[in-house]
Image (cartoon, grey):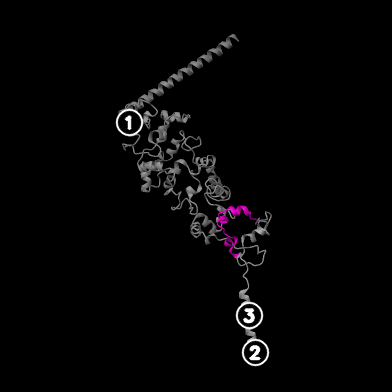
Amino acid sequence: MRGSAFSLAVAVLLAISVRSAPAAPPINNDDCLACHSDPGLKSGAGKSVAVDPEKFKGSIHGQADIACVDCHTDLKTIKDFPHPEKLRSVDCSGCHEKETQVLRASVHGAATIAKDGMAVGCKDCHGTHDIRAKDDFESRTFAINLPETCLGCHRDKVRNERGGAFVALYEKSAHYRALEKSGLTLSANCSNCHGAHDIKGVKDAASKVSRKAIIKTCGQCHVGIQRDYLEGVHGKDYVKGVKDVPVCTDCHSEHDIRSPLDLESKVYTTKVAAVCSRCHDDMALARQYGFLPNRMKTYAESYHGTASKFGEIRVANCASCHGFHDIRDPADPKSSIYPANLPKTCGRCHPGATKHFAEGKIHNVMEPTADIRDKSSHIVKTVYIVVISAIIGVFLLFIAADLFRRAVRRKTHG
């Protein structure tokens, strides 16, 4: 009995001593940096595992006093150091649950789930120990820095139908020039058009750059242009869901959007007609939607078209007469080619243009029609061609006769 009482007393004393013993102090950042602040510290595989204390302190996590073990959670239970080399991947969803869920539903999340070699995680865009707020000049997602962050993968690594060079065209665009060269952070960057965590494939109806959404996306910055477009014939068909109607990217391209004053722009003054004719010279589209075809051919045969072909930039093109984004039906009183508005439209280039000056058709076919004005235009054009051809023929005959006379004289006087 005495033995049992003694054993019980010893057990109670041991329990009390264990419970009263001081708990092991939690691991703090200084403990981790004691090793990881060494710039030369590498893993067994030769990968650097160094952490710059100053960069971490300046990061958004460092400023919020986030501990290393808050992210590297499996180190919370480690008592012996150095710790095992292989640790669990950091899971950002513990704090950023909403963003993580959105990312998983994006094209980046799909690539990660498919494990096709292009897995994309938070650190690929935001960094690791040097993460900064998106409005911080040094952040990888700051407006000016974001294109280079995205191009880090999309320039060379991403496998898509058009390749990395297609995305890299952004570096030649008006948007990039305003952003990189002028520091205009309001200029469109990758996330403005594609989104941030919720990026979808271009063929996905939920994508910000799908045909269904592209007008609204571009309209975030180009509000006035969006309004004009929606009031025009193209915009009205777009609202109805017509799949063949042109949208922003059909005329201006996607990444390689340039100023209309840029010689390489798809809408440079001498190239506008070619852009419009992709649809307006398409016989199938003309039959389906009831518009007149052969617009490029008839424009090219006009004075305007001929001058444009030879590089004259002051001559009228499609947009000069029909408008740019607010193209309207010719029967619309607000249309720039409505009969009552033609003197004003023509007067932009031809000051003092009258109603009769504007009666001639630009898109006139070679054959005369029943319309007396078309017949007159055809006759004038035919006479013009005959007279010019005759004058040129006479000059050529005169030059040939002169050359013949000179040759005979040299032969005679040897």
Element type where label 1 sits in the image: loop
Reading the image, the residue beneath label 3 is 13
Q: Name the chief secondary structure element in magenta.
A: helix
Reading the image, the residue beneath label 2 is 2
| Residue 369 circle label | 1
At which x and y percent is residue 217? Answer: 44, 47
**What's drawn in magenta, residue-wise?**
50-74
Name the residue type under label 2.
Arg
At which x and y percent is residue 144? Answer: 53, 45
> From mark 1 to mark 2, how far is it between C-alphas?
130 Å
Q: Image height check: is 380 above or below 239?
A: above
Q: Nearer the viewer, residue 387 or 149?
A: 149
Q: Image height check: is 386 above or below 326?
A: above
Q: Residues within 10 Å of mark 1 (few under 14, many from 20)?
A: few
Asked if marks 1 and 3 touch (Cβ < 8 Å), the reply is no
Q: Nearer the viewer, residue 33 or 102?
A: 33
Name the residue type under label 3.
Leu
- The quarter holding residue 225 reads top left
Asked if marks 1 and 2 touch (Cβ < 8 Å), the reply is no
Q: How many marks?
A: 3
- Report the side of 378 relative to 20 (left or right): left
At which x and y percent is residue 304? Answer: 42, 29
Whether residue 119 appears in this view of the structure is: no
Q: Residue at x 60, y 60 (%)?
A: 68
